[in-house]
Amino acid sequence: MKEFDGRKLFKTVILHEAEVAKLYEDLAKKMEDKKAKALFEKLAGDELRHEKIYQNLLEKLPNGGMLELSDEEAEYTELLIKTHIFQNDDVKARYSKRDALVIAEKVERDSIIFVEQVRNLFPDLIPDEFKTIMKEEKKHLNYVLNSQFDSSLRFLGL
């Protein structure tokens, strides 16, 4: 067993949500298609709201956020923190219209993984809010995947 500071995970998730919102705001500005622009603006707003929820939860963590985790669980959580998409400057440099849906898919999948890990480590911390966030993150991923599919069909001339 290992003592782990759960605040590190929350701070990473808060940063992730803020960066995703910024990404979506930037992408919305680049979109010429009104439907795509509106989608990215809506996603950005949702991510900003998620950021605020996590910020409020950070202040309510039991035991100041300190947890006893197995070595494997602590290692996994540290890996999530170290490898999330916004730690990678090469990925940041690729924020373009062409890569928008690929990057959006990655950040939404990361968001779902983060929600699951936070919920796993802090199961008694406002479960209804985690359910709401998870539902929205899955909806975001569905939007992105459907947009990728539609884009592929247009590319193929179908």
Image: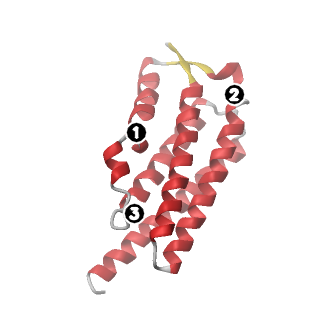
Q: Label 1's element? A: helix
Q: Residues within 10 Å of mark 3 (few under 14, many from 20)?
A: many
Q: Residue at x 34, y 62 (%)?
A: 99
Is tag 3's residue or tag 2's residue first in the polypeptide sequence? 2
Question: Looking at numbered disc 2 in the image, what kind of residue is underneath it?
Answer: Leu
Percent from the top left, x then y, of residue 93?
34, 51
Question: Looking at numbered disc 3 in the image, what kind of residue is underneath it?
Answer: Ala
Question: Disc 1 versus disc 2: distance between alpha carbons?
Answer: 25 Å
Q: Residues within 10 Å of mark 1 (few under 14, many from 20)?
A: few
Q: Residues within 10 Å of mark 2 (few under 14, many from 20)?
A: some
Is tag 1's residue or tag 3's residue first in the polypeptide sequence? 1
Percent from the top left, x then y, of residue 32?
46, 78
Q: Quadrant of residue 54?
A: top right
> Compared with residue 141, is residue 111 higher up or lower down, i.e. above or below?
above
Q: Which residue has dot 1 on it?
A: 87
Q: Which residue has dot 2 on it?
A: 61
Is tag 1's residue or tag 2's residue first in the polypeptide sequence? 2
Percent from the top left, x then y, of residue 59?
72, 30
Q: Are marks 1 and 3 in contact (CB under 8 Å)?
A: no
Q: Label 2's element? A: loop
Q: Which residue has dot 3 on it?
A: 100
Who is closer to the viewer here, 97 or 112?
Answer: 97
Q: Residue at x 28, y 80 (%)?
A: 155
